[in-house]
Amino acid sequence: MTVGTVALAVALIFVVLTYFYSDDQRSKREATNELGAYHVQYEHLSPKQQEEIVNNPKIQKHYLSYNSKNVKSGLFEKLNINMAIGYMEGINAGLIQLREGRAPVTDDEMVLDKWVIEEMGFPSKLGEVIPLDLQIKSTGKTEYITKSFKLVGIVDDIAVRKAARAGLMFISKTLSQRYSPDPDIVIFALLNSDFNATSTAHKIGEGAKLQEDQIQINERYSGAYEQNPVSILKAAIIVFVILISAAMVIYNIFNIYLSEQIRLFGMMKAIGMTPKQLRSMILTEGLIISLAGSSMGLLLGGGGSTAFIPFLGNMASGNSALYVELSPYIACAVFVMGLILVMLSVYMPARKVGSLTEIAAIRYNPAGPLGKRSLDTKSKLKNSISGFSLVSAQLIRYRKRTWVTVISITLTGFIFVVTGSIFSSMNIDNMAGSMVPGDYKLSAANLDSDEQLDLLNDKVMQQVKTMPGVTTVLTEMYDVLIYNKQDANLHLKDLASMKNPDIRTDIYAYDDALMTSTLKRLGKDDSMLTELRSGDNLIAVAEDGGYQVGDKIRLAKFGEGQKERVFTIVGVLPNYVTYKGNSSDGGVLIAHQDLFKRLDLDQRIKQVSVQVNEGQQGEVERNLKGIATADRRITFTSFQETYQEFNGMKKVLQLAANSLTSALLIISIFNLINSNLTSMYARKREISLVEAIGMSRSQLTMQLGSEGFIVILFSLLITFSLGIPAGYFGVGMFKQSASYVQYQLPMAAMLTLVCAYCTVQVVTTFYMQWRLSKESLMERIRFSE
Amino acid sequence: MILQGKKLCKYYGTGESQVKAIHDVDFAVAKGEFISIVGQSGAGKSTLMHIIGGLDAPTSGEVIINGTSIYTMPMSPLAVFRRRQIGFVFQAFNLVPSLNVWENIILPIGLDGKKAEVSYIEDILNTLGIYEKRTSLPTVLSGGQQQRVAIARALAARPAIVLADEPTGNLDSRSSNNVLDLLRLSVEKYNQTLIVVTHNDEVAKLADRTVRVVDGSIAAEVEQ
């Protein structure tokens, strides 16, 4: 049993560490595949800044990108696609994940997004020649040309970009330089070391006199690769908790193992064995057990990892798949940890045995000595003793053992609750649900010049509303307001780099249904809807810090001599919630459609989203596509892919969360089982003699069960009292790097913990009863006599 | 007869390695009687006591206490029967280390869901000379004191029968005499039946009747 327990503990450490290692490798693979292998991108660089960054010795690799902002295509505008056109290095090196093909080399080659090619009406096939009408603005002139490009590479679709209609078009370096002699330069840099990469990347940028907003950290890559004191500390805490849990399990089992033999050791001392010989005998025995246990544990852990991790891997797909990655370093470290843990666990009982006198050892009671403070009880003597008195006497007078059990269970439970808080707060559903208001949408092309054109007019809207299967119709209007410069200074960044004399602000108007769902994201009720309908109130779309609720801003309608009006910000939504793609310099604001009516803003519907009955999606999709086909200025978008992408992301996150929490739960359960069984074996004789003087089976069940339940209750109280605030704090820290995180009380984790502990307690109580019933009362009373 | 043992057998193992700890023993005890069971070490006297005390079921045979065949009872009712009808004094004291002296003594009463008669328990404690130790934990008591606590516990629930297995086995001669006197005094005072297992002839002589066990069978019964 002792060797088995050591083997199980070592196997558990091995499986958990192998899981972390495999997950880390998966995360790194995924990060590299999704956004490319670079730590930071430096934007809008001057030639001097570019030179300084390129020559910085802390940069291992760099890729240049020229963004030709002065080049536009009428076709893309007609299709309502915001294209980023330019040159980029490192495509062939995997900086951009190509579905197929390579980077453009000659002036007539290009790389495009798959979905863009399809919307343009071409097959997404390499070698396809696509003609484009280009407008090239340069030194105040606009040149119109038509040029054919050969498709040499196709970029994999990213659903979020697709939903925001933000496309990529890469052209050759020479063509980019010819079209844009003064391009917007971006450098993607891979640093020499992952250690403190974010801080190093900032220092490099600051050294080249870059503003904060010119330095964009690749959070995906840095998140996966970066090592810093905080990440090392986090990993160390997790390893420490696992080790402590395993150490407690091993210590418990050795303590009881040696306690059972103390009388034998006393006898050996009595016949002449010196304390040193006794200690060395016990330590040698411990060493043999640890070698056997650690070896078995490694085999068991290797087998467990091979079975467990690919099973988890099968639940994900593609780049997110989790493969078992066995590391010889982990195997060696775990083996050594097993030896150290056992030797430490043996050392303390060995010292205790060595220091006991011969007679004390021979008379030793394996139920454990009581502390000095417990030798006399001053409590008032009662004329009855209940089952609870027995339980409380047991727990209070053996408080040292009770505390070890409580701490051991609390430690793992604490980590479980904190991890549960973080994972339950990663509200991916919210993220996908907010960015994607419905199942499909129709958008009108942004043709500002034609004020008479109303693409999504009443007739089209009626058609959409009456489509069988459509359950909800959500509409958006759009207009532009001019920001007061003084106010803009308070709320907007980069004002200096704005070239337009007026600061244009995009303002979207939502109908009741869309506004209600947006308010839900803000945690507001319907009274806010009334405020937005009737007052000059707006919701700002911005990252933290730009706006505060209650801010007053002055905006004017577009056009000469328009009077400014004061609006109140009643809510601030992060960008991810209502992702609008590229916006004007003045950012994005959201109003109710009633405000548009009152201010006489553009009341044409610019976008309509629909929610559809699950069984009728195909039919609605066909009908909506029919509307878009009839008028190419109307764009049809399906959110099914976006949902799928979010679902994939959610699945991977849930997988990681479930695996980690499962591992922690298994450790907690293992601890509880160990504590219960250790306690029972240590008190086998004592339990039996109470049975001999008349304790019935049901009373014994109550006694064993109650002891366990009190320990569980106490442990859970401490776990929740400390774990919930720690989880809240942990979520707060995590929120700094993931804005979509919203704190949620980890109810599921807490309930799981309560249910798991209670189930384990019930099962172990009956198991202990069963084990006891296998021997007669007298056999048990003679135990260790 | 308050207690009868009929054709009691207790065998361990099978075939050639079978050990007959108790073999074909018939045994009867009248109410209020003080019986000593004697025999050499390994003769089977403790096994016999455990069987008649309801702690160890015989391989065959029957134990009847107050008209009830105790081994026909399920485990829980047997435990209840034990705590109401039988008081045990074990050789190794067998006190619950986490309970103090008082709690150890009233434990069988508490297990029965009843309240102890405080004056009665105090009387026992005074008789046994351990009243001052009533709040102490067993670990701080001497062997003699622990044995007295065990005797007090055996008497506390006013059982019909008190079974004592080598009650003086771990005690010096002075303490042994004290404990026996007290035990005898107590059972006389409270009109109980006492069965003492011992290998000490001096102890055996104090009994009304001595039963000698040899190789698992009753070899002789001597009335004092």
Image (tube, coloured by chain):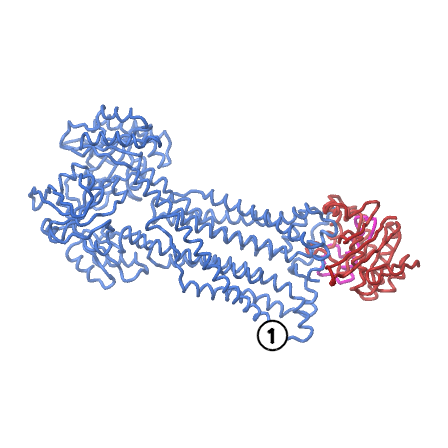
Chain colours: A blue, B red
Residue A539: horizontal and vertical position, in percent? 29, 35
Q: Looking at the magenta stretch, what is its main secondary structure?
A: helix
Q: Nearer the viewer, residue A535 or A275?
A: A275
Q: Residue at x 83, y 66 (%)?
A: B173
Total label count?
Answer: 1
Q: Nearer the viewer, residue A323 or A185?
A: A323
- The residue carrying pointer 1 sits among few (fewer than 14), some (14 to 19) or many (20 or more) residues within 10 Å by Cα, namely few
> Which span is picked out in magenta?
B133-162
Residue A119: horizontal and vertical position, in percent? 20, 39
Question: Dot 1 corresponds to which residue?
Answer: A276
Please state, as top left, top right, bottom left or bottom right, where the C terminus of chain A lies in the image: bottom right
SS of the residue at dot 1? Answer: helix
Indicate whether A712 appears above or below B48.
above
Q: Residue at x 63, y 70 (%)?
A: A355
Q: Residue at x 28, y 34 (%)?
A: A440
A123 relative position to B131: left or right: left
Q: Is residue B136 magenta?
A: yes
- Residue A118 in which image quadrant: top left
Q: Nearer the viewer, residue B58 or A350?
A: B58
Q: Is residue A283 magenta?
A: no
Chain containing mark 1: A
Please state, as top left, top right, bottom left or bottom right, where the N terminus of chain A lies in the image: bottom right
Callout 1 amino acid? Lys
